[in-house]
Image: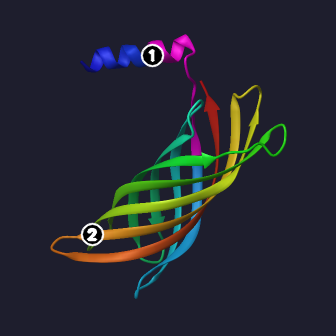
Amino acid sequence: MKKIIAILLILLFKSGLFAIGIGPQISFGQGFLIQENMILITGASCSIKLDKEPVVINIATNYDHIIDCFNPEITVDYWLFSPKISKYCNYFLGIGMGSGVEFSKNDFHFTSTKRLVTGFSWTYYDGFLEYFMQLTAEEENHFKFPFNTRYAFKFPLSLGVRFYY
């Protein structure tokens, strides 16, 4: 079954029905845990965007330098609108959600994230190359069993590039 799905995806990409943009992204930002520490995050991720649909998938690895924890997560954003500002530049605004884990030397949490994203993207070479800058406001819920929940607010700035195939 996996081979059939892989073959179908390859045929869709080769047929030109849609293109997909893939590229690296770096993020850095600040935030805070409610009634706890400040947050200072940096991260690297892989950004995936569909050409014909306003959907962006991000597979991220973030590190918090103050709390000393690692936070791998997957986010999905939907651009509500993306008007053209100039020949090459678009502005976008969207909403999203994410899920991941956060772990340090002594602790482990599951995370659930609600996101508001805004930014600019510049597309060149007939849609082959896209640079982007994105500012995100995130509300993140941390769940630890049994019944321990904490909340964080983060404001990362992301810079990246995607190549469309």
Residue that numbered label 2 is attached to: 143
- Could you tell me residue 111's position as x and y percent? 34, 63
Query: From this viewpoint, is residue 111 visible?
Result: yes
12 is within the stretch colored magenta: yes
Q: In which quarter of the image is the C terminus?
A: top right
Residue 155 quadrant: bottom right
Left/right placement of residue 16 relative to residue 84 reads left
Kindly identify the residue that appears in the image at 41 percent across and 83 percent down: 34
11 is within the stretch colored magenta: yes
Dot 2 amino acid type: Phe
Give the number of the disc on residue 160.
none
Q: Residues within 10 Å of mark 2 (few under 14, many from 20)?
A: some
- Could you tell me residue 13's position as x and y percent? 51, 18
Kindly identify the residue that appears in the image at 26 percent across and 72 percent down: 107
- Residue lying furthest right in this view? 86
Q: Which of 6 and 64 is in front in this view?
A: 6
> Which numbered disc flags the more N-terminal residue, 1 or 2?
1
Dot 1 amino acid type: Ile
> From which residue to which does the magenta span run?
10-24
Task: Give the SS element for disc 1.
Answer: helix
- Residue lying furthest left in this view? 146
Query: From this viewpoint, is residue 104 visible?
Result: no
- Residue lying furthest bottom in this view? 35
Residue that numbered label 1 is attached to: 10
Q: Residues within 10 Å of mark 1 (few under 14, many from 20)?
A: few
Distance from Cα at disc 1 to Cα at disc 2: 38 Å
Vertical side of 121 occupied by 117: above or below? below
